[in-house]
Every structure is written in structure tokens, then in C-alpha cells.
Amino acid sequence: MTKITIIGSEKSGKTTLAGKLGKKGSVADITMYDFAKSERVLTTIDATGYPASTKALVTALNLSDIALLCVPPEGLDTMAAECIIALDLIGYRHGIVVLTKSDLSYPLALEELKEKLQRITKGTALENWDYHNVSTTTFEGMEELKEIIFTLDEKVEAEQRKQDDLPPRVIVDQSFNVTGIGCVVLGVVSQGTINAKDKMVAYPVKKDLEIRSIQMHDVDVKSAPTGARVGLALKSIQSKDIDRGFVISNEEIVATDLVLECTLSQLAKEFEVGDMLHLFAGLQSSPVKVMNIIQDGGNAEKAKPGKKYLVQLSGSKEIAYSKDDRFILTNLDEKQRFVAFGYSQ
Ligand SMILES: Nc1nc2c(ncn2[C@@H]2O[C@H](COP(=O)(O)OP(=O)(O)OP(=O)(O)O)[C@@H](O)[C@H]2O)c(=O)[nH]1
Ligand SMILES: [Mg+2]
């Protein structure tokens, strides 16, 4: 099951491309498109709520395994530049840089644009991504793009199979009530394998539940492996008790305040003690206040771009996480909002 997110420059043709890759489904601040042919299922996410909300971008990236960064002939704009910083901070592994609207350019210019982008992304998570030219008007490159996506997905799948035996975790992105069935959630198995009848817990509220049944793309299955997009009917819990961002798991740490070892982006603005930032953990987010910044055992007043600090944060909401989870910090007051990544100490 291939899950991709389409991001990039404004008006670069992202939504048009998503529409060509599948049938439109649920709409919120992200829009999903589904394509199924024989064994292959492609879920495409358009982060429609972004750039207004950074949450839409973080959500879309967390729900997918492959990112398509769209850049039109005009080149990068501030939105695509911010996407590159976000991908780098998240440590996003797999993606393709798609040079869109190729019908409005010519081969030499596209080659120059590719070389320029390769220089800009050197040393970032995007360093080794492939480039591909596409036009949704003339269909140039469309079939090849699908092939490239499916080939890349074989790598993703191989990585995911190595995670099937880890403790199971499901990241919930929607929950609702279905008459006659009860609480249904949609989400992604981020690691491990889940089975019908498994008893698990919804975090951060710590409510016990049982998985009544599992569906993958409207088909009932007995179990679902790492990377699967699933619909779960749940027992012993109501849809009002579970929300986007919740983690269904057997063991999570729950905290409101955190101490993170943070690395700031080279391209972020500094922040200081007292500043309000936004913390992301998977699909969860919470406003946090910077209480303390520590460098080399001593207090620092400011955290500066490209540097590493211990940052003490005071939040307003419980967050569920695991020891190895990567947190992202954003500053909504800045033009380029993605600031840092960090790991809990
Ligand atoms: N010539 C040409 N025009 C295109 C192509 N793809 C999209 N467009 C046009 O570009 C415009 C923007 O397309 P969208 O798909 O809305 O772009 P978007 O990136 O989703 O835009 P935002 O969500 O507003 O950032 C529309 O007028 C499309 O018809 C293409 O391959 N070639
Ligand atoms: Mg759009």
C-alpha cells in the first residue's frame, strides 16, 4: 500500500496532479485521493490546509511514506522552501522532486532548474531524491511518475516489513460513530502488526479498548502490518473519547511538559526563554512555552540557528509519545515557521 503526499510551491499544480492520481475522498485540512488497480493501492494526500496551517503539512507527511515536492518552471517559492525545511527537520526519508507544468518549459531550462535545486538541497533529507518532469496538461511523464512511485514504494515496503514485529502503534487521523457498529477510527499502523480482537489502549487518555474488526481499503482483514492505512471498529470506547492525533498502542509515555534535546534548523530564526512555540508529536500538537535553554550544562538566553540545546518546554496539553519519537517545533510568528527537531530526554 503506497501512501504519498504532494507538497511544494504555490500553484505548482499539486491539486491537479493529486486528482490525476486517484479518486477524491475525505476532505478536511488534508484531502485524500485513492487509486486501486489489481494489487496496487495508492493513497495520495493533498495538504490543502497548508500553508495557512503548518499542522496540515505535518499531518500529511506523517500519514505518508513518500513525498512529492512539486516545483513549477518559475522555481522555488517561500512555501516550497518551507516544505524543504520541514522535510529536513522531520528527517523525511523518501521522496521525488517533481518538476511540474513541464509543458510550459523546455528541456534545458528544466535541467538547469534540477541542478539548482540539487545545489539548494545538498546536505538535507532531500539530497538523494530523484527528479522527474511532469505535465498534467500533456500527460508528459505521468505514467513514468506512477512507476517511479511504485518502485520507490518497494524500498518503503522492505523497510516496513522489518518493523512488523515491533510493539504495535496506530496513529489516528479520524474518528466517528457508525450506527450499528459504534466507534470507528481511521489511521495508519506506524509500527508493528495489529490483529482483530487485540486489546490495546488509546493514548494520551489511557482508555482501554478492543479492536473489533479491521478494514484495509474497505476490505475486512484479520491483521494489518506496519504502513497499512486502516479503518478500525473499536469496542469499549466511544468516538467522542478518541480524536485525531491519538495513538492506539500498548505502551506510550504521556506528558505535558518536556525536556528535548533540540537541533535548530540553519534556516530558522533564534528563539528565547519565554517564547511560545508549537510542538508536534506525530499528529498531535500543543502550544508550548520555552522555560529554559541549556547549552553545555549552563543556561543560555537564546537558541540559535544550526545549534543544539536542551530545551525545557511547558505545554498545555497531554502528549503521547515513545522514547525514540522525533518532535518538531514551529514558531507561528515567523515567516519560515519550522524551527527545530528534538528528542525527549
Ligand atoms: N500548463 C499547465 N498548467 C497546469 C498544470 N498543472 C496544473 N496547471 C494549472 O495550474 C493552476 C494551479 O493548479 P493547482 O492544481 O490548483 O495547483 P496547486 O499547487 O494545487 O495550487 P495551490 O493549492 O493554490 O497552491 C491551475 O490553473 C491548473 O490548471 C500543467 O501540468 N501544465
Ligand atoms: Mg491545491
Image (cartoon, grey):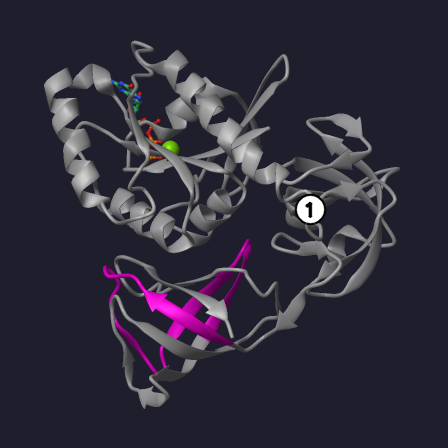
Residue pictured at 58% horizontal, 75% vertical: 256
Q: Classify 10 Å Cα crowding around label 1: few (below 14), some (14-19), many (20 and above).
A: many
The answer to which of 224 and 185 lies nearer the viewer is 224
Residue pictured at 64% horizontal, 47% vertical: 191
Is residue 313 depicted above or below 246 in this figure? below
Residue pictured at 34% horizontal, 90% vertical: 298
Is residue 203 found inside the magenta-colored segment of the image?
no
The residue that disc 1 covers is 192
The answer to which of 15 and 163 lies nearer the viewer is 163
Residue 110, how many percent across, how many down? 16, 23
Q: Is residue 113 found left or right of 55 in the rendered image?
A: left
Characterize the magenta stretch by its predominant secondary structure: strand
Is residue 263 depicted above or below 168 in this figure? below
| Amino acid type, label 1 | Gly
Q: Is residue 48 found left or right of 241 in the rendered image?
A: left
Q: Give the range drawn in magenta.
A: 259-288
Residue 252, how many percent across, how many down? 68, 64
Residue 96, how many percent across, how many down? 35, 31
In this orientation, does residue 106 appear? no
- How many numbered discs sit on the rendered protein? 1
Is residue 207 depicted above or below 143 in this figure? below
Is residue 260 found inside the magenta-colored segment of the image?
yes
The answer to which of 178 and 198 lies nearer the viewer is 198
Q: Is residue 281 found left or right of 181 in the rendered image?
A: left
The answer to which of 134 and 50 lies nearer the viewer is 134
